[in-house]
Image (cartoon, grey):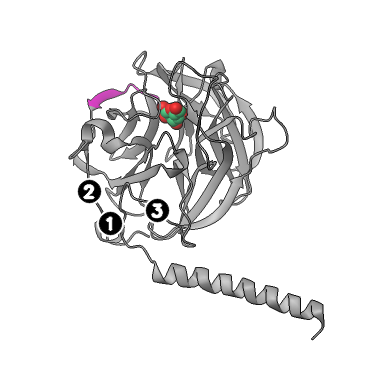
Amino acid sequence: MKRQTILTYLFASLLMMTGTLNHTYAQNNKNSVIKSGTEWLDTNGHRINAHGGGMLYHKGTYYWYGEYKGDSTYWNPKVPSWECYRTEAGGVSCYSSKDLVNWTFRGVVLAPDLTNQRSDLHPSNVIERPKVVYNDRTHQFVMWMHIDSDNYAKAAAGVAVSNSPAGPFKYLGSMRPNNAMSRDMTLFRDKNGKAYQICSSEENRTLYINELTDDYLKPSGRFTRNFINLSREAPAVFFHNGKYFLISSACSGWSPNQAQYAVADSMMGVWTIKGNPCSGKDADITFYGQSNYVLPIAGKKDAFIAMFDRWNKKDLINSRYIWLPILFKSNNVIDIPWQESWNPSIAFRRVN
Ligand code: GAL
């Protein structure tokens, strides 16, 4: 055999072996339960790196988007007033799954900008809490995220679009919605197709609900100020049985605090505070977690997963995930009890 042919053959065999190994890994290590707070591996055996995440269900597949954190955590001297530990912002990662327990890495779908120091997406800046919704008028997947400068002074929201759920996403830029600050945020797409960006504003003291334009790329100009001066962060919104629910955390940086939920008849408010949705061991500090998203299970009645990050502030890439089913006690009362582990295909019978 010619040298080049031998090399090509060796390279192809290596690729096949890695493929087989990955395949074997996935086969031998199929997950069936969700074990909150433990290390979660993807189908290739690598630690899942998708923090402050958001979910999208599209054509039978769940997509999980999150902060792709850099390896090392350091204390940020530019923010002396609070424990501002940070990592390099590595863009937004995406994982996909059909059963919610076995997740395949689909890559970094919004890439960081490694060269331009002034770019929002430069690793020295902050890219947090990405969320994606699908727009069926424009057929685009629209991502919104918290964009900040390394000293958290920019307080803005960034927007990116893609024609496919697994990216790549094209970054369109950032703004302060309705000329107000925007830090911790989520997106919510209502059943009538209207979408909203919900964010901590006014130095995190007041939560804004910003209605978006029909293409979901900008604020429409309609907004409400909610939980005024109550300093709510980490919003996660869902709709159940005619009511809108909003779970949030208090404002204590990476350290856990007590969650709270509120209920409304309309997305723009008025919101009525109900109290702590969590119960069981460590429920007073959200099981050492902080809310990031609530996922409705496609086609299932009363089936929702509350998702939290358990931050490891001195080693942020090693933060863990907490996913728990939501129980509905009455029309506007929920309970999220701690469970060591649970099986979504039993809890929700079939997940898709
Ligand atoms: C939290 C916030 C996180 C991150 C962190 C930085 O309060 O929810 O997303 O921004 O502060 O300390």
The percent position of residue 114, horizontal first and vertical second, equals: 69, 38
Q: Please report the residue visible at 27 percent of the width from the left and 38 percent of the height from the top.
A: 287
Using residue 8 as the reference point, say whether residue 248 is left or right of it. left
Question: Around disc 1, counting alpha carbons within 10 Å, would you say few (fewer than 14), some (14 to 19), or many (20 or more)?
Answer: some
Q: Which residue is mark 3?
A: 40
Ligand 1 quadrant assignment? top left
Q: Give the residue at mark 1.
A: 348
View extreme (bottom): residue: 1
Range covered by the magenta-colored residues: 268-274
Residue 332 visible in rendering: no
Q: Is residue 103 left or right of residue 141?
A: left
Closer to the N terminus: mark 2 or mark 1? 2
**Cβ of mark 1 under 8 A from ligand 1:** no
Q: Amino acid at mark 2?
A: Gln
How many angstroms separate mark 2 from mark 1 (CA)? 15 Å
> Of residues 54 and 179, which is closer to you in this image?
54
Q: Which residue is mark 2?
A: 339
